[in-house]
C-alpha cells in the first residue's frame, strides 16, 4: 500500500463529466489498496471569472477580499469531487484549506505555505476514506483566508505530499507531461520522460506554467517524487501503465541528460520593463530604487544598470505585468523624487525567453548560438541575464512565438534525439 497525492488542474475538473472521470481514476487507485489524497483546482475558467467580477467592482480590489472570493472556486470543485466519489461508492471527504489547516503567511494573492497539520487527513485515511484538500488556499495566523498565487494548486499538492511523506505526488493536467517547450506554441515540442529537478526549477521559474515554481521548490526541499501526467486518458487504464507515463522529475543527473546541452525553452509573456532615466550615479542608489519595491512585496526580475555618463546612469528592471501599476505608483510617488532621477519610462509589452539545460555548464558558445539565432530573425535583445544552466533575454513581446520556435529548432529540440 502506498500513500499517493493526486492533483487535478482546472481543465481536468472542467465539467461534471470530467469530475466524474477524475472520481473514476481516484476510485481505481483506492480499489488497488492505496491511500489517496486529492488536491483539485477550481473548474477551468472559474478563478478568472471570479477575479473579473472583482475587477468590475473595483480597479484595484482589496486583496484580502479578493482571496476570500478566489478561494471559493476550489471549495466548489472539491465538494463536487467528493460527491462524485460518494456517488461511485467510494468513501470520501473534502476539506477547505482552513479546515486542515494549511497555514500560510499573510501575503494575500501570493501567500506561502508555512505548515500543514495532517491530523485530520491521516485520521480519514486510516478509516479508508479518500481525502480531498482544496488547492490554492490556506489560512494565516489571523484566521484570514489566503491564496497562493496563480497555479498555486500545484504547490498545495506537493506541500501536502511533503507533509504526509507521500510515496508520490501525481500532477494530472491537460498535457501528458513536461515538454521541451509549451506544445501549444511549438507543435514540434517533445515530451521528456524524465527532467532533472534543477532544470524543472529553472523552467518553472522562467515561465513554464505546467508547474508553479513553488511546487518545484517544495519537491526539492522535501525530496517529493513528482510526476506530471495526463488526466485526459481513459481513467481505467491499468495502474502500471499510468505510472510509466508522463514526466518524472528526477533528483539524479544521468548520462543521457548531460548529453542535451539545452533541454528546454521557457518563456513568460507577463513582463514589463521600467527604466529610470538619468539617475545620479552614487553609492546606495540601487537600494534606494529597489528597496521600496521589494518592501512592497513586488518581485523584481532582471536588472540592468548602464555605464554612467557625466555622473548619471539609466537603471532598468522588469516586474510581472500584474505589479506594474503598483510599481509605477511607488516610483512616481516616492522613489523618483528621493533619488532625483529625471523620469520613469515604461515598456509594458516585453517578454522573457530563456534556454535551459544542465549541459550548458560544460559547453561554451551556447549563449552565442542563442544570440545569433535571434539576430537572424531580426529580433532585438533588450536585456540579458545568465546563470550556470540558463540564459534569458528580454525582447519585444510581439516576437515571442517567433523567438521560441527559432530557438527550439536551433538547439535541435525538434528532433528525436532530445527525447529523454
Ligand atoms: P492545470 O490547469 O492542469 O494546472 P496549466 O494550464 O496550469 O494546467 O498547465 C498546463 C499547461 O502548461 C499546458 O496546457 C501547456 O500549454 C503549458 N506549458 C507551458 N510550458 C510547458 C512545457 N514545457 N511542457 C508542458 N506544458 C507546458
Ligand atoms: N485556480 C487557481 C488558478 O487558476 C489555482 C490553480 O489552478 O492552480 O490559478
Ligand atoms: Mg496549473
Image: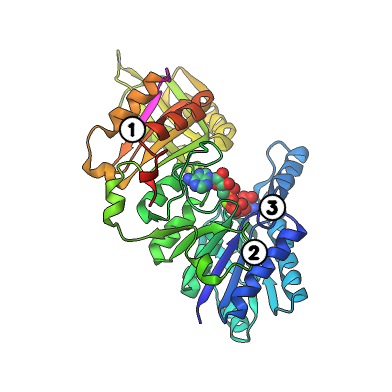
Corner quadrant of residue 197: bottom left
Depth check: give the residue in front, 183 or 333: 183
- Dot in front, 3 or 2: 2
Residue at (37, 49) in percent of width and height = 199
| Highlighted range, magenta | 377-384
Of the numbered discs in the image, which one, if any, rests on residue 8?
Answer: none
Marks 3 and 2 close (CB-CB < 8 Å): no
Of the numbered discs in the image, which one, if any, rests on residue 284?
Answer: 1
Disc 1 crowd rating (10 Å Cα; few below 14, some 14-19, many 20+) is: few
Corner quadrant of residue 266: top left
Depth check: give the residue in front, 155 or 81: 81
Residue 31 visible in the displayed image: yes
Counting residues from the N terminus, which is met first, the one under dot 1 or under dot 2?
A: 2
* Main SS class of the magenta portion in the image: loop
**Residue hosting label 2:** 134
**Residue hosting label 3:** 70
Seen in the image, is 337 located left or right of residue 37?
left
Counting residues from the N terminus, which is met first, the one under dot 3 or under dot 1?
A: 3
Residue at (43, 66) in percent of width and height = 224
> Looking at mark 3, is its residue's CB closer than 8 Å to ligand 2?
yes
Residue 198: x and y in percent read 35, 52
- Dot in front, 3 or 1: 3
Magenta stretch: residue 19 in it? no
Seen in the image, is 369 located left or right of residue 341?
left
Marks 1 and 2 close (CB-CB < 8 Å): no
> How many numbered marks have been drawn onto this rendered protein structure?
3
Q: Label 3, secondary structure: give it.
A: helix
Q: Label 2, secondary structure: give it.
A: loop
Amino acid at each position: 500500500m502506498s500513500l499517493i497525492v493526486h492533483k487535478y488542474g482546472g481543465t481536468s475538473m472542467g465539467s461534471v463529466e470530467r469530475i466524474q472521470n477524475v472520481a473514476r481514476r481516484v476510485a481505481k487507485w483506492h480499489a488497488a489498496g492505496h491511500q489517496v489524497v486529492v488536491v483539485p483546482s477550481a473548474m477551468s475558467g472559474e478563478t478568472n471569472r471570479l477575479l473579473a467580477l472583482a475587477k468590475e467592482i473595483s480597479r484595484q480590489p482589496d486583496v484580502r477580499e479578493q482571496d476570500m472570493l478566489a478561494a471559493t472556486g476550489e471549495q466548489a470543485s472539491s465538494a463536487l469531487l467528493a460527491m462524485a466519489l460518494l456517488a461511485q461508492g467510494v468513501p470520501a471527504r473534502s476539506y477547505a484549506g482552513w479546515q486542515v489547516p494549511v497555514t500560510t503567511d499573510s501575503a494575500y494573492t501570493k501567500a506561502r505555505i508555512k505548515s500543514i497539520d495532517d491530523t485530520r487527513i491521516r485520521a480519514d485515511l486510516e478509516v479508508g476514506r479518500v481525502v480531498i484538500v482544496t488547492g490554492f488556499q490556506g489560512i494565516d495566523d489571523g484566521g484570514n483566508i489566503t491564496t497562493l498565487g496563480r497555479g498555486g494548486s500545484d504547490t498545495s499538492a506537493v506541500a501536502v505530499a511533503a507533509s504526509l511523506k507521500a510515496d508520490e505526488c501525481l500532477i494530472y493536467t491537460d498535457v501528458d507531461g513536461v515538454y521541451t517547450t509549451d506544445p501549444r506554441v511549438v507543435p514540434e515540442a517533445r515530451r521528456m520522460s524524465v527532467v532533472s529537478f534543477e532544470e524543472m526549477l529553472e523552467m518553472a521559474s522562467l515561465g513554464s506554467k505546467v508547474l508553479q515554481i513553488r511546487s518545484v521548490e517544495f519537491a526539492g526541499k522535501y525530496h517529493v517524487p513528482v510526476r506530471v501526467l495526463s488526466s485526459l486518458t481513459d481513467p481505467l487504464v491499468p495502474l502500471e501503465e499510468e505510472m510509466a507515463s508522463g514526466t518524472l522529475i528526477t533528483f539524479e543527473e544521468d548520462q543521457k541528460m548531460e548529453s542535451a546541452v539545452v533541454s528546454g525553452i521557457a518563456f513568460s509573456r507577463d513582463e514589463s520593463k521600467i527604466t529610470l532615466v538619468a539617475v545620479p550615479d552614487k553609492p546606495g542608489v540601487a537600494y534606494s530604487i529597489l528597496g521600496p519595491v521589494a518592501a512592497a512585496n513586488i518581485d523584481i526580475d532582471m536588472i540592468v544598470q548602464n555605464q554612467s555618463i557625466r555622473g548619471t546612469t539609466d537603471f532598468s528592471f522588469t516586474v510581472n505585468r500584474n505589479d506594474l501599476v503598483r510599481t509605477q505608483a511607488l516610483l512616481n510617488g516616492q522613489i523618483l523624487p528621493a533619488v532625483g532621477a529625471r523620469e520613469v519610462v515604461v515598456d509594458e509589452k516585453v517578454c522573457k525567453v530563456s534556454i535551459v539545460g544542465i549541459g550548458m555548464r560544460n559547453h561554451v558558445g551556447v549563449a552565442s548560438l542563442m544570440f545569433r539565432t535571434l539576430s537572424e530573425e531580426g529580433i532585438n535583445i533588450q536585456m540579458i541575464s545568465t546563470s550556470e544552466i540558463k540564459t534569458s533575454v528580454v525582447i519585444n513581446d510581439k516576437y515571442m512565438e517567433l523567438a521560441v520556435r527559432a530557438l527550439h529548432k536551433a538547439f535541435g529540440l525538434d528532433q528525436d534525439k532530445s527525447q529523454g
